[in-house]
């Protein structure tokens, strides 16, 4: 016992005392420096920010696009390795502020790595722990703060607790330890499944999908062939590819202007210069029509093709109004049927010189603008009120007495003739479209034959060029230049060859000065 017996007593613990005597340091605790923490806004499987967040009952967050293929392949929790039922996953509803940062929708506090974040199992809404603790737990008001749906205290799931971050340790994840991954091809194939985004299916939906899988046939993809640009179908305007590539950031750069290719029908219609002539054979007699093929090309082609194919054979005139018109061209005979040769309605073609003036005007019937199909009507008198509403495409040139007989037939209250007036057939005397098609086909064949001859000549000349070598005429520079023929030599050279050279006059030089009398 001395005076210095308590000199080592201190008011604090030294590092050695803390680590050895008092057990402050645990040997199995991991160092903070080696701890790799996953952010709360990242998927625990891909380690990337999530887009469609889901969570397990213990609060582990996954992305829908990654966890579903993983569970289909492995069937267990990627973090713990324990079996996981996909139905137990809970959809989360995160809220963002105007800056795009996640925050609590009640307190509006921005979530960070030190925030205590919880979610409600029944609704999936995500809040800060402070809001749920004060407004739900302490107030004993177990209703969702946004939707007012009831829940229990056990439905509060902790997504992030700053005092317990062990579940965010990436090195402890089961799929990281065992290197369990999903190929991108598998993910893409799963996304193509229509039921991929469906969480649950009722019996009606399941039956409908099974029937769809059984009966659905994918439509065949038609390969579009680009028509070759020729002098005939070249437009006066370009394709616009240069301007589009100049202003677009995604289009491929184009520096050469090319003329646009006109549609084949436009090329054909430009060469139609003649009228068409058709005869309709009816039960009352024959009707001869002149068609304005040079003015309303599309409408006349539709009518001529129907006549040649027998589309109107056996049809009736289903509507007749005395002093007005008679209508036909419907295979169903009801006034609601008929189809164009293109399988869809085509546009009107109005011309200022084609009007409903006089008896026997042939015009298209329609149900509104640009709804022409196969039905037509013949006027009994002038109908100026139909101008620019129905396309006039022909006129009667023979059979006025037949029209008169048709007009005399009695009709019922719905303007339907009591005696059937039938179209028994049709004869086409002049078809300008067939002539133009034959002419274009002949020109195309000639162009193809000419192109083939040009290719053959180019190939033969190319082959000869390889075999023939230039002839050498002399040595040195200009050895490939041929020598001029002997007949083209100058006269001086000819004299030297014969030995008789022309004598030059002698010039007498005088050293004295004389007068100018020789001038």
Image (spheres, rainbow, N blue to C red):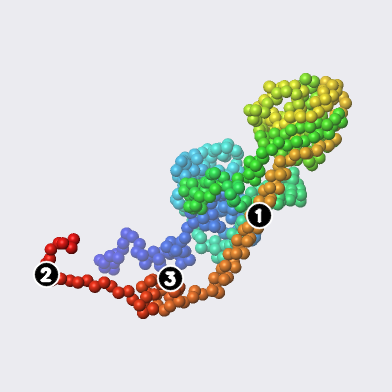
Reading the image, the residue beneath label 2 is: 512
Please tell me which of labels 1 and 3 falls first in the chain.
1
Comparing labels 1 and 3, the label whose residue is closer to the camera? 3
Q: Can residue 350 be seen in this view?
A: yes
Inter-mark Cα distance, 1 to 2: 90 Å
Q: Position of residue 93 (x, y in %)?
A: 55, 44
Quadrant in the rendering for residue 499: bottom left
Which residue: 35% across, 77% down? Answer: 500
Q: In this view, does 223 lie to the left or right of 250?
A: right
- Whether residue 19 is situated above or below residue 392 in the rendered picture: below
Marks 3 and 2, the one that precedes in the sequence: 3
Label 3: which secondary element:
helix
Other-residue count near label 2 (Cα within 10 Å), few / some / many at <14 / 14–19 / ≥20: few
Rendered position, 391 above or below 6: above
**Residue 488 got which mark?**
3
User: Pointer 1: residues within 10 angstroms few (<14), some, or many (20+)?
Assistant: few
Residue that numbered label 1 is attached to:
446
Corner quadrant of residue 78: bottom right
The foreground one among 302 and 510 is: 510
Provide the secondary structure element on which disc 2 rests: loop
Q: Nearer the viewer, residue 262 or 40?
A: 262
> What is the secondary structure assignment of the residue under circle 1?
helix
For the question of whether residue 346 can be seen, the reply is no
Say left or right for 343 vs 283. Answer: left
x%, y% of residue 452?
63, 60
């Amino acid at each position: 016992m001395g005076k210095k017996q308590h000199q080592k007593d201190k008011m604090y613990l030294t590092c050695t005392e803390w680590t050895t005597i008092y057990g402050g340091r645990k040997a199995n605790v991991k160092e903070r420096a080696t701890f790799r923490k996953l952010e709360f806004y990242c998927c625990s499987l891909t380690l990337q920010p999530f887009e469609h967040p889901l969570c397990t009952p213990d609060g582990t967050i996954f992305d829908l696009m990654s966890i579903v293929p993983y569970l289909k392949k492995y069937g267990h929790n990627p973090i713990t390795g324990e079996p996981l039922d996909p139905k137990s996953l809970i959809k989360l509803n995160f809220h963002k502020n105007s800056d795009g940062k996640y925050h609590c929708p009640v307190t509006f506090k921005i979530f960070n790595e030190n925030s205590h974040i919880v979610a409600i199992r029944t609704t999936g809404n995500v809040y800060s722990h402070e809001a749920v603790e004060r407004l739900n737990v302490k107030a004993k008001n177990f209703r969702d703060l946004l939707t007012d749906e009831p829940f229990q205290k056990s439905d509060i799931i902790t997504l992030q607790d700053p005092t317990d971050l062990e579940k965010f340790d990436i090195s402890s994840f089961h799929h990281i330890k065992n290197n369990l991954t999903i190929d991108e091809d598998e993910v893409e194939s799963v996304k193509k499944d229509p039921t991929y985004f469906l969480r649950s299916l009722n019996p009606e939906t399941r039956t409908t999908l099974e029937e769809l899988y059984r009966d659905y046939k994918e439509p065949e993809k038609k390969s579009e062939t680009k028509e070759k640009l020729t002098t005939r179908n070249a437009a006066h305007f370009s394709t616009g590819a240069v301007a589009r590539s100049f202003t677009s950031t995604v289009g491929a750069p184009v520096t050469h202007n090319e003329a646009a290719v006109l549609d084949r029908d436009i090329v054909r219609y430009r060469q139609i210069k003649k009228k068409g002539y058709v005869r309709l054979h009816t039960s009352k007699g024959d009707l001869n029509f002149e068609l304005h093929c040079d003015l309303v090309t599309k409408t006349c082609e539709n009518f001529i093709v129907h006549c040649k194919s027998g589309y109107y054979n056996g049809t009736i005139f289903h509507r007749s109004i005395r002093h007005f018109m008679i209508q036909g061209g419907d295979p169903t005979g009801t006034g609601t049927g008929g189809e164009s040769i293109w399988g869809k309605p085509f546009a009107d073609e109005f011309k200022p010189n084609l009007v409903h003036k006089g008896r026997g005007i042939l015009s298209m019937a329609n149900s509104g603008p640009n709804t022409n199909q196969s039905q037509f009507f013949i006027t009994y008198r002038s109908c100026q009120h139909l101008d620019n509403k129905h396309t006039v495409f022909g006129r009667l040139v023979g059979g006025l007495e037949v029209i008169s007989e048709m007009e005399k037939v009695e009709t019922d209250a719905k303007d339907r003739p009591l005696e059937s007036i039938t179209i028994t057939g049709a004869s086409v005397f002049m078809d300008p479209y067939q002539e133009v098609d034959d002419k274009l086909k002949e020109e195309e064949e000639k162009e193809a034959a000419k192109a083939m001859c040009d290719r053959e000549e180019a190939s033969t000349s190319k082959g000869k060029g390889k075999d023939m070598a230039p002839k050498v005429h002399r040595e040195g520079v200009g050895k490939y230049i041929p020598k001029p023929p002997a007949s083209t030599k100058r006269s001086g050279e000819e004299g030297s060859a014969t030995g008789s050279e022309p004598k030059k006059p002698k010039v007498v030089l005088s050293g004295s000065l004389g007068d100018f009398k020789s001038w």
